[in-house]
Amino acid sequence: MTSRLLILGGTTEAAALARVLDGDPGLAVIYSLAGRTSDPGAQPATLRIGGFGGAEGLAAYLRSEEIAAVVDATHPFAASMRWHALAACSAVGIPQLRLERPGWDPRPGDRWIGADTMADAADVVVSTAAKRIFLTVGRGELGSFGPVADGRRWWLVRSIEPPVGEVPAPGEVILDRGPFTVAGEIGLMRRHRIDLLVTKNSGGDATEAKLEAARRLGVTVAVVARPASPPGRATTTVEEAARWVRATLASQPG
Ligand code: NAP
């Protein structure tokens, strides 16, 4: 009998897990994306795209698709989906695991200023009197910086897809997707004479180079903390998640 696993994706780790499990005998992997990226590229497993309609919609999907287990590998800053996954899995009574990459920690030489929210990060812009700011916060978060974009500061905005809503100005928008290199990030920050980098504490290798670049250049970094994670079983590694999936599904009655 085939067991059906749902992976809630949108992260490198989610795609990696789907690849690791692809081809496991007796396992069908369904990989779910919200649909934020216009071209998600080649994805492993069976791909489905779009929201479920809240926790109730997800619970209905789990039942109708006879999903045996869920790995929630959405981004650490995905505010709603993680809670919906927890609620839906417990309503349906199926096992769920959260796969979440570790956050970044400051290293010697870093000039980090912590921010609890994006609005706090905008306050850091003011308190540091930064003049040339590099925003790598996601295209939907730029509105928080509108109140401090008073024409006296210059903004470099980088996002994967074109920004939505208000973009701080004057400045420049770069559309690019990691992985980025330290040399590339140093060049970019030097070229634009950046004096403050703003980032979420997303963690992961693909976008970490900007932190190393900031360290080497002595650039201050405003680091927005992660929102609280839901309770429940969790791991930080793809290998551990794969072990959990195999053990969990093997122990279910056939
Ligand atoms: P969110 O606030 O938790 O999600 C908003 C809504 O999008 C959810 O309520 C759900 O709609 C739908 N959704 C989210 N993830 C989904 C998935 N994997 N499959 C199907 N529907 C999903 O998350 P977000 O911040 O908008 O992020 C959206 C997606 O981008 C997530 O998959 C996340 O992993 C990825 N991502 C986010 C960030 C970030 O910084 N937030 C960065 C990189 C990647 P319904 O309620 O209708 O089910």
Image (cartoon, rainbow, N blue to C red):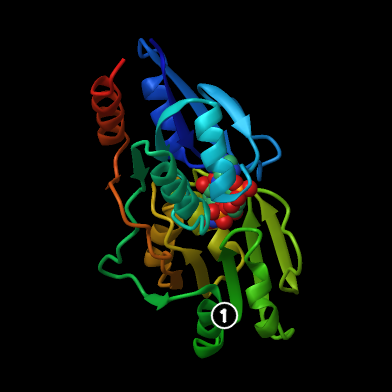
Q: Splitting the image into 4 quarters, where does residue 253 fall?
A: top left
Residue carrying label 1: 122
Q: Is residue 212 above or below residue 41?
A: below
Q: Splitting the image into 4 quarters, where does residue 146 fall?
A: bottom right
What's the residue at 51%, 26% (across, down)? 30
Whole-percent x, y for residue 3 in the image: 40, 19
What's the residue at 49%, 43% (across, down)? 179
Image quarter where the N terminus lies is top left
| 185 displayed left or right of 90 | right
Whole-percent x, y for residue 198 in the image: 51, 69
Image quarter where the C terminus lies is top left
Q: Is residue 112 above or below residue 29?
A: below
Q: Is residue 193 above or below residue 124?
A: above
Secondary element type, mark 1: helix
Whole-percent x, y for residue 100 in the image: 36, 48
What's the residue at 40%, 37% (across, down)? 71
What's the residue at 37%, 23% (across, down)? 20
Q: Amino acid at mark 1?
A: Ala
Task: State the residue in front, 166 or 221.
Answer: 166
